[in-house]
Image (cartoon, rainbow, N blue to C red):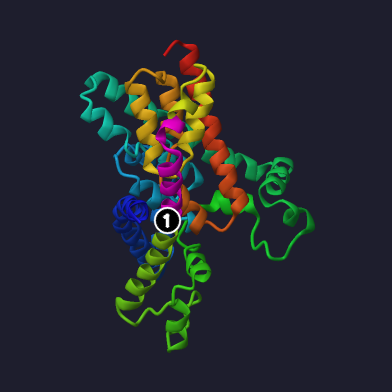
Amino acid sequence: MELFEHIVTHALEDTLPIVPFLLITYLALELLEHAAGDRVNGVVKRAGAAGPVVGALLGIVPQCGFSAMGATLYAGRVITLGTLVAVFLSTSDEMLPLLVAERVDAGLLAQVLLAKAAVAAVVGLAVDAALRALRRNARAHAAMRRGVLGPAAVAGDSAVEQDVIDELAEAGEGADHIHRLCERDHCGCDDDHEAGSSGHDHGHDHHGGAWPVVRSALSHTVQVTAFIFLVTMALVAVLETVGEPALEAFLSGNRMLAVFASALVGLIPNCAASVVITQLYLEGVLSFGAMLAGTLVGAGAGFLVLFRTNRSLRENVVILVALYVVGVLCGIVLTGMGM
């Protein structure tokens, strides 16, 4: 019984700090959709070009709420894929507080944060540029479509509403995709429409005051929070029974293999991953390259929000694999340089 109470308490401690970020994000998304027009879409589009740089800087803040916010905004296609990747790569989770608590040299601290931000910004900008190039290349376009959508792309499945490359490339160009989150989550917007809303294409009530916006945002927040809590509770249960020593043993092998292992641990959507990786680096078990590989990949609860809100499972898996590859490559380069 005590173990169960501890698991629930720990899961709540990991989940509750994210709730304000989710609520603020969903409120912003609802307001964007209600105000959707040429002016709003123009602002979003102009911000999208610099998104990866902004995302890389925001990700440095030691709070996984920004990765959750990024995942939600990406699911609504308000930000680009490159911006999402930048936020995920830059997110530090518990790394920064641990380094500060251990009174790590300010120069080293700046080196770690700048390295993460630089990699995040460069990779994010490259992803957006690659998507724009793929959109113009018919052969690569078709191959990417098959890779992400699978059999549906080959069979011409009518359930596939839009070409995947077009949709990814259009992310960050406007607020027109936000209503899809409501359609998938059944947030109650359609009820407003049935109660007498004025013909908005997305089923939102423009004349019902602030309540429809707040209710929809609360509905989204509750659904995603419940999902995060349940998955986090399962992860905490595994970590409490298997124990962090098992992770430490997994990471303390061969110097080069530790890079791959650290990046793999970084994919665990829980703050325990960044804690273990950072602690082992401080103890000298992990090299700087291995530590950076793991903390680049780690995005905490952002992964859970992405899988809950973004409808394409294949797309989400591709994003995770891409993050892992980037983290491993950076770790290998740094480890090869003796860092």
**Is 63 left or right of 199, judged from the image as shown?**
left
- Magenta residues, as a range? 230-247
Work out which quarter of the rendered image holds the N terminus and state it: bottom left
Residue drawn 48% across and 52% down? 306
**Picture layout, residue 27 above or below residue 302:** below
**Picture layout, residue 192 above or below residue 326:** below
Where in the figure is residue 21, as x and y percent of width and height? Answer: 32, 55
Residue 172 in view: no
Q: Which residue is mark 1?
A: 228
The residue lying toward the viewer, choosing from 337 and 80, is 337
In terms of secondary structure, where does tag 1 sit? helix
Q: Amino acid type of disc 1?
A: Ile
Residue 216 in view: yes
Q: Main secondary structure of the magenta part?
A: helix
Task: State the image quarter where residue 278 is shown.
Answer: top left
The residue lying toward the viewer, choosing from 96 and 172, is 96
Work out which quarter of the rendered image holds the C terminus and state it: top left
